[in-house]
Image (spheres, coloured by chain):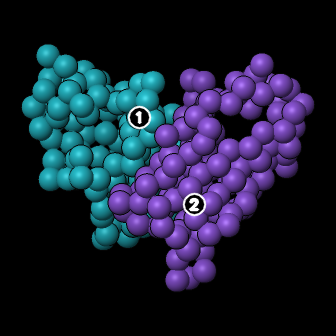
Amino acid sequence: EMQLVESGGGLVQPGGSLRLSCAASGFAFSRYWMHWVRQVPGKGLEWVSRMDEFGSITSYADSVKGRSTISRDNARNTLYLEINSLRVEDTAVYYCASDLSGRSDWWGQGTLVTVSS
Amino acid sequence: EIVMTQSPLSLPVTPGEPASISCRSSQSLLHSNGKTFFAWYLQKPGQSPQVLIYLGSNRASGVPDRFSGSESGTDFTLKISRVEAEDVGVYYCMQALQTPYTFGQGTKLEIK
């Protein structure tokens, strides 16, 4: 069974850093582009970042560009997102997802990041 | 940035009745490879989003056939032939032609 499990969320002070992880299983992780999407509780969805299957191509939303780094370890079937200089407005549930808009479009259950003093 | 505009934002439906949600993109989502980089998602209460329709009008695996997607230029439509109680939640459209990928505002479907 295909599964994406995010971890690493929690309470962080403004200006702090966090590294989110997404462990994949049940599918050929190394064959797919992977993404991070976030959602402020009670609000809509915001795409955050993506990485190609080889770990060579990355893209970021303007809201996190320059503060975030997406990476992956295909040997460990794991996707990462590191966010620095965290702001209150980064508070959200962060989802990892595969192959957005494609046949193998799957999402994890999300991990909550709360930025507050 | 491509803007995705959904309507309606709220959709009360009687069980067994049809429902339709529209999404308009600010530019064509047709790639030079012939694929349309557009999807419909349903986020049920307390759950993560799940894809219903991918690459424009293809029903995802496991999605009931009462769901269908169509496209005409920059206009996309999700139709539910007969709404069931389990269909409640927020429906989102999304474009994946270019970054930043963008979502519609969401349409909340509720049962009357």
Residue that carries the numbered disc 1 in the rendered image: A39
Left/right of residue A20 with respect to residue A108 in the rendered view? left
Q: Which chain is purple?
A: B
Q: Which chain is cyan?
A: A
C-alpha distance separating marks 2 and 1: 19 Å
* Marked residue chain, label 2: B
Residue that carries the numbered disc 2 in the rendered image: B38
Under tag 1, what secondary structure? strand
Where the N terminus of chain B falls, by quadrant? Answer: bottom left
* Marked residue chain, label 1: A
Left/right of residue B90 with respect to residue B15 in the rendered view? left
Q: Amino acid at mark 2?
A: Phe
Q: Amino acid at mark 1?
A: Gln
Question: Vertically, is B82 above or below A81?
Answer: above
Q: Nearer the viewer, residue A79 or A59?
A: A59
Dot 1 alpha-carbon crowd within 10 angstroms: few under 14, some 14 to 19, many 20 or more: many
Where the C terminus of chain B falls, by quadrant? Answer: top right
Picture disc at residue B13: none
Residue A93 percent coordinates (x, y): 39, 31
